[in-house]
Amino acid sequence: MADSHRETDDVTAAIVFPELSAQPEPEPGGFRQTFRALRHRNFRLFVIGQIISLVGTWMQNVAQAWLVYRLTHSELLLGTAWFCTHIPVFALGPLGGLVSDRYSRQRIVILTQTLSMLQAAALAVLTLSGKIAVWQVLALAIVLGCINAFDMPARQALIIHMASKEDLLSAISLNSAIFNSARVVGPALAGVLVASMGEGVCFSLNAISFAAVIGALIAMRLPRFVRQAQESPWVHLLDGFRYANRHPVVRPLLLMMAATTISSMPASVLMPFFADAIFHRGSQGLGALTGAMGIGAVVGTLFLAGQARFSGLPTIIRLSTITLGIMFLVFAASPWYALSLSVMPVIGFAIMRQMASTNTLIQSLIPDDYRGRIMALYAMTVVGLGPFGSILAGAMAHQYGARATVALGGALCLLATLLLRLRPVAASSK
């Protein structure tokens, strides 16, 4: 029975994503496949640095959201803070991808991580001094967004060079698992520290944590970067857009991620409001909700790292998106904090399996010359479109209420599954 289901998935994938049938499948899955990428020294260094740095990053994310809410008690300004953090990724993403394909990705990431450390330090100094104002938080959020516009495509494009194409699924999934393990630890620490010592301590610890990833990047031994592109930056930029638009797999997957990003924003942006105003659990309740989501995401990505067949990834993406939409509807209607807390691991499980599967499919099918520009488009859909969803979520929650806004996001997420089913078929039938 299991073999027949797998054969059905293979046939479906060949019809919906015809290029997948030409891809070599990894070795059989299991425990060894899950952690296969750790056999590479550069990736092991990256993992060590990421574990430390990302805990600090999640502490800052939670502390910043709580700081804005404490200063304003405004759902609209919560959405505005998300907007300021992520809109530069959308506005400057193509430029970040272009730079990533024309210069050393290792040096780019070292520079961006150093600048991120300075941004966290500035936020810490202002907060600890007691002179912090909302406009300063928003301005520093924009600064961080500009840094991320160059960091994200370079870092994503660098992963395959830290490991190998053969171990790409393992590397991306483990990277996602680390990201979400930090989501468990960081928010929990932030909840305790914010309640006892204030937000400034979280910002200070985040600034210190960047030393780990910067040191790991410097210690890596990577091949010397040789630029392949000879055309002008403008021609090079447009060529990346044309490539993504013509690709029968990349285009529908990017559209799918764009749709689900918009629909996922209400739950993410309004989580502090649910934790405090609806369930009366304060900053510790917010940390628990965010941490529970991280637990589900870690489990989901570790299982994905052991996935042995690329042809099964489209099915994983589709089922994950359906699950995500249903769980948003449950979260919106939940009358009890315990139920909402139990839903969060399922949301984390679904959303990170969707993202890691999409990232892996795209990176396995594109040549390295385009990797920075295509990963910039991926970052634009996953992160850069978030500001539009966040500002809309804040405005709608202000007008219609937080529950109705999250429910609408769940409905839109379910509708987005039609995009994955229909657009690739149309593309392959031409």
Image: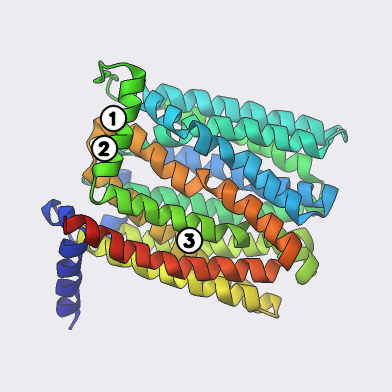
SS type, badge 1: helix
In the drawing, what numbered circle is on residue 325? none
**Mark 1 nearby-residue class (10 Å; few <14, some 14–19, many ≥20):** some
Identify the mark at residue 239; answer none if there is no mark.
1
Which mark identifies residue 243? 2
Q: Which secondary structure lies at badge 2?
A: helix
Q: Is residue 383 visible?
A: yes
Q: Report if the CB atoms under discs 1 and 2 are less than 8 Å apart.
A: yes
The residue at 78%/64% (across/down) is: 276
Task: Name the mark on residue 297.
Answer: 3
The amino acid sitting under disc 2 is Tyr
**Residue at point 38%, 26% (across, down):** 98
**Residue closest to the eye, 14 or 43:** 14
Query: CA gap, disc 2 to disc 3?
Result: 31 Å
Q: Kindly give the residue lying farthest to the right in the view shown.
A: 130
| Residue 272 screen position, x and y as percent | 72, 59
Total labels: the figure holds 3
